[in-house]
Image (cartoon, rainbow, N blue to C red):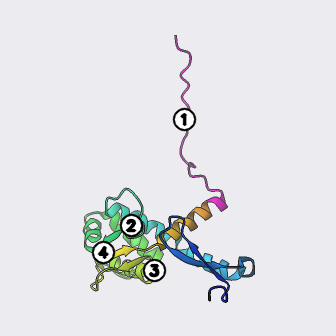
Amino acid sequence: FLYRIDRILLQTGDKAGYYCGYNHPELAKQKIRRQFDQVASEFDGLVQWLRLARSASNGDRPLVTADELKEADLLEAIEDSPHLQAQLADVAHKLKAGRIQTEAKQKLRAVLEQLADNGYLHKKSSAGSVYAATAKWSLLYEQLEFVRQFEGIDLNAGQEVTEHNQGELF
């Protein structure tokens, strides 16, 4: 079936998920460009969300497949920090979710629901207060890495490299 619709099955680099690619990408350049433009328009909001989620959960790594997010835990951290509240407002604006909401709880719920609707999170409970990260984050990381390599973005840019010359030892 995939061959008939010009698709192939691919696996993310971390082996956490599968997705479809084009069997003949050179024939689907316009479709690929539109899909990539759509994802690229969300990059900033998604990266901001990753930073917010990591800060709110005091994590030391970005979200990966099957990581669990509890709305109550995130909300507690966000309500305790004006910085995280501002970050949430920025994420909501960039992801176009809950922008008109005034309370952090409403903004957070709108962002979580949008991430679930777009396949980045999966609701683990019927109440929707516990979410699991999906393998779509793995695909996002691969797309970000592609952009970094294609655009020639240096990961060390902006970091001062100081070379200390010790001189001669006596």
Gap in Å between the C-alphas at discs 4 and 1? 42 Å
Gap in Å between the C-alphas at discs 4 and 3? 22 Å
Residue at left 45%, top 80%? Answer: 119
The mark closer to the camera, 3 or 1, is 3
Decide which of tag 2 and tag 4 comes sooner along the chain. 2
Please rate how many residues cluster around mark 2, counting C-alpha atoms within 10 Å: few if below 14, some from 14 to 19, many from 20: some
Q: Position of residue 149 (x, y in %)?
A: 63, 59
The mark closer to the camera, 4 or 3, is 3
Q: Position of residue 47 (x, y in %)?
A: 47, 66
Task: Please give the residue where the numbered disc 3 appears in the rendered image.
Answer: 119
CB contact under 8 Å: marks 3 and 2: no
Q: Amino acid at mark 4?
A: Ala
Q: Which residues are magenta?
A: 149-170
Gap in Å between the C-alphas at discs 2 and 1? 32 Å
Task: Please give the residue where the numbered disc 1 appears in the rendered image.
Answer: 162
Q: Is residue 114 above or below residue 158?
A: below
